C-alpha cells in the first residue's frame, strides 16, 4: 500500500470508517460486493497521501451520502492539500464542481483538451449529435450483438407514431429490435433510460414490472407504456440496454432524442409556478389543510 505498519495502524480506523465497512471487518474481501470493494479501494487510495490521485468512475457506486463524501475528500486533496486529482467520470456535475481543466477521450484517443466549460459543452453537444442520427451505423455500442435495437419511436395508446410526448398524456416508448438469424435469446431484459443534460430522470425495464420471461427472436418491437408522461417540455436523450441470460447484448448511450411539450399534467391549467420553469419531473399529488388550533 505504500505505507509503513505504523501508518497503517494509525489510519486503519479512519479508512474503515470512511468506507463504511466497520461491520464487515471479519468478512473476507473476496466476499464483498462490487460496491463495497470500490468504497474500500477509494478510502485506501485517498488516505495514502499520494502526489497524484486517479479516481476512475468511483461515483458510479454507493449511495448519495457516500458519493458526497468522495467529492468532499477529492476537493480536500486538491484544494487544501495541494495535490493533483485526475477524475475519470461521465458525471458532468462532479466534473464541473471539481475540475479546472478537462480532456475528452474517445476509444483511447485524446480528442479535446481545454477548460472545464469548453470540454463539457463539447461533450454534451456530441451526445446530442449522436442521438439525432440513425442507429444502423452506430459503432459506439457495446454488448455481444446477437440482438440490436434498430429503432426508437414514441407512440400513442393506439400504436400510432407521434413526434412529441405531451406531459400528462399516456405515451408508449417503442423499441424495434432484430435478432441474428436462426437464434433465440432467452431470459432477456430490455431497459430504457430517459436523460437530459446527462442527468437520468427515469428508467423503464421489462425485468422490473412483472415476472414474465422475455424471449426474443427474429424482428419485432417492445413497447413500454408510460402513463401520464411525468416530464415537462424539452429535449431528452434515450439510453438503451438489452441482455439475455445475464449477458449484455446491446448497450448504447444517446441512442435517440425525444421531444416533450408541456401539457395540462395536473388538470388545473397550470404546470409550474412563475419562475419554476427549470423543474422537469412532475408528480401527481393532492393536499389537505388540518387546523390544530
Image (tube, helix red, strand yellow):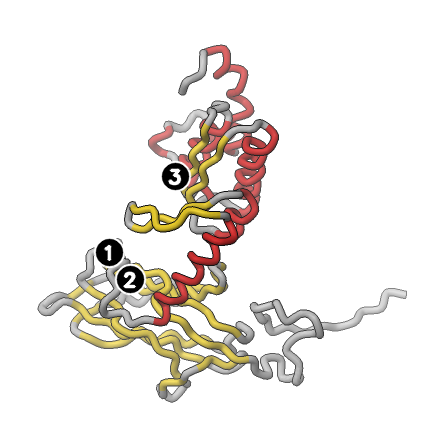
For disc 3, the neighbor class at 10 Å (few under 14, some 14 to 19, many from 20) is few
Whichever of labels 3 and 1 marks the residue nearer the N terminus, that label is 3
* Numbered mark located on residue 33 in the image: 3
Looking at the image, which residue is at 24% across and 54% down?
Answer: 247
* Numbered mark located on residue 143 in the image: 1
Whichever of labels 3 and 2 marks the residue nearer the N terminus, that label is 3
Looking at the rendered structure, the number of numbered marks drawn on it comes to 3
Tag 2 secondary structure? strand
Q: Are marks 2 and 1 in contact (CB under 8 Å)?
A: yes
For disc 2, the neighbor class at 10 Å (few under 14, some 14 to 19, many from 20) is many
Tag 3 secondary structure? loop
Q: Is residue 205 visible?
A: no
Q: Nearer the viewer, mark 2 or mark 1?
A: 1
Residue 147 percent location from the top left of the image: 20, 65
Whichever of labels 2 and 1 marks the residue nearer the N terminus, that label is 1
Looking at the image, which residue is at 63% across and 71% down?
Answer: 277
Which residue in the rendered view is the most extreme toward the left?
182
Viewer-proximal residue among 270 and 28: 270
Splitting the image into 4 quarters, where does residue 171 fall?
bottom left
Residue 137 percent location from the top left of the image: 23, 67
Q: Nearer the viewer, mark 3 or mark 2?
A: 2
Residue 188 percent location from the top left of the image: 26, 63
Which residue has dot 2 on it?
242
Viewer-proximal residue among 240 and 243: 240
Amino acid at each position: 500500500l505504500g505505507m509503513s505498519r505504523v501508518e497503517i495502524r494509525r489510519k486503519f480506523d479512519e479508512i474503515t470508517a470512511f468506507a463504511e465497512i466497520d461491520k464487515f471487518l471479519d468478512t473476507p474481501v473476496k466476499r464483498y460486493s462490487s460496491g463495497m470493494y470500490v468504497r474500500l479501494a477509494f478510502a485506501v487510495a485517498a488516505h495514502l497521501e499520494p502526489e497524484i490521485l486517479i479516481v476512475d468512475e468511483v461515483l458510479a457506486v454507493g449511495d448519495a451520502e457516500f458519493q458526497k463524501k468522495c467529492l468532499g475528500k477529492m476537493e480536500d486533496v486538491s484544494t487544501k492539500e495541494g495535490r493533483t486529482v485526475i477524475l475519470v467520470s461521465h458525471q458532468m456535475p462532479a466534473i464541473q464542481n471539481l475540475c479546472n481543466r478537462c480532456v475528452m477521450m474517445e476509444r483511447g484517443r485524446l480528442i479535446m483538451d481545454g477548460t472545464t466549460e469548453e470540454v463539457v459543452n463539447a461533450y454534451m453537444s456530441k451526445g446530442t449529435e449522436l442521438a439525432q442520427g440513425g442507429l444502423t451505423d452506430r459503432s459506439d455500442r457495446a454488448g455481444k450483438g446477437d440482438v440490436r435495437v434498430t429503432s426508437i419511436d414514441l407512440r400513442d395508446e393506439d400504436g400510432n407514431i407521434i413526434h412529441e410526448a405531451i406531459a400528462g398524456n399516456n405515451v408508449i416508448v417503442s423499441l424495434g429490435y432484430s435478432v441474428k438469424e436462426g437464434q433465440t435469446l432467452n431470459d432477456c431484459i430490455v431497459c430504457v433510460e430517459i436523460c437530459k443534460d446527462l442527468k437520468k430522470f427515469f428508467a423503464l425495464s421489462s425485468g422490473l414490472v412483472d415476472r414474465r420471461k422475455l424471449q426474443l427472436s427474429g424482428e419485432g418491437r417492445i413497447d413500454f407504456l408510460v402513463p401520464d408522461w411525468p416530464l415537462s417540455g424539452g429535449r431528452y436523450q434515450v439510453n438503451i440496454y438489452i441482455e439475455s441470460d445475464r449477458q449484455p447484448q446491446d448497450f448504447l448511450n444517446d441512442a435517440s432524442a425525444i421531444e416533450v411539450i408541456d401539457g395540462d399534467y395536473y388538470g388545473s391549467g397550470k404546470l409550474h409556478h412563475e419562475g419554476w420553469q427549470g423543474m422537469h419531473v412532475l408528480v401527481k399529488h393532492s393536499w389537505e389543510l388540518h387546523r390544530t388550533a
